[in-house]
Image (spheres, rainbow, N blue to C red):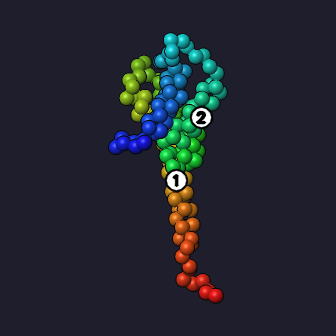
Amino acid sequence: MQNEKGTIGEGIGIGILVLAIGMPAKERAGFLVLLGTELNWSLPLYLAVATLGGAVGGALLGGRHYVAGFIGGVLAGPCSFFTVYYYCLQCERVYSIEGIIVQLVGSLPGFALFYLLKREEASDNSADEEFVGSPRVDAPRF
């Protein structure tokens, strides 16, 4: 189902990215307490959650290019987590818009990888379609 603002999957993907990356990064830096309790997780567990959240969120945001979105999300998750975490360590107060902007900047490597993979997939598909059902001009005819 799609409207002018995007698909439901894209909205869910953004929600997963915020919940699995942005909020835990702020909590790890001491700014946000999730569900009224401190998580006190180890750093590898935070990274696993960020990677998994990035992968699932990226796949949902990727639409029909879900594999490229998944791979880009695997990169974007930890990069974004560390970007938000280290930014929050240096601040006394973090506004929501700051967290969103910092998370977007941290996700840029994953977005770049997604678009490279998406373009590569599109070029592979167009090359396959070029040869399906149409004879090549220089091919010998029997």
Callout 1: SS: helix
> x, y (%) of residue 33?
50, 15
> x, y (%) of residue 41?
62, 19
- Seen in the picture, residue 96 relative to 64 is either above or below; the reply is above
85 and 120: which is toward the camera: 120
The residue that mark 1 highlights is: 118
Q: Relative to 94, is 121 on the left or the right?
A: right
Tell me which corner region of the image, top left, top right, bottom left or bottom right, holds residue 102: top left
**Disc number for residue 109:** none
Callout 2 crowding tier (Cα within 10 Å): few <14, some 14–19, many ≥20: many
Callout 2: SS: helix
- Seen in the picture, residue 122 relative to 65 is either above or below; the reply is below
- Residue at image position (58%, 16%) is 39
> x, y (%) of residue 36?
50, 11
Q: Amino acid at mark 1?
A: Lys
- Residue at image position (53%, 28%) is 20
- Residue at image position (57%, 43%) is 70
Q: Amino acid at mark 2?
A: Thr
> x, y (%) of residue 31?
47, 18
The residue that mark 2 highlights is: 51
- Quarter placement of the C terminus: bottom right
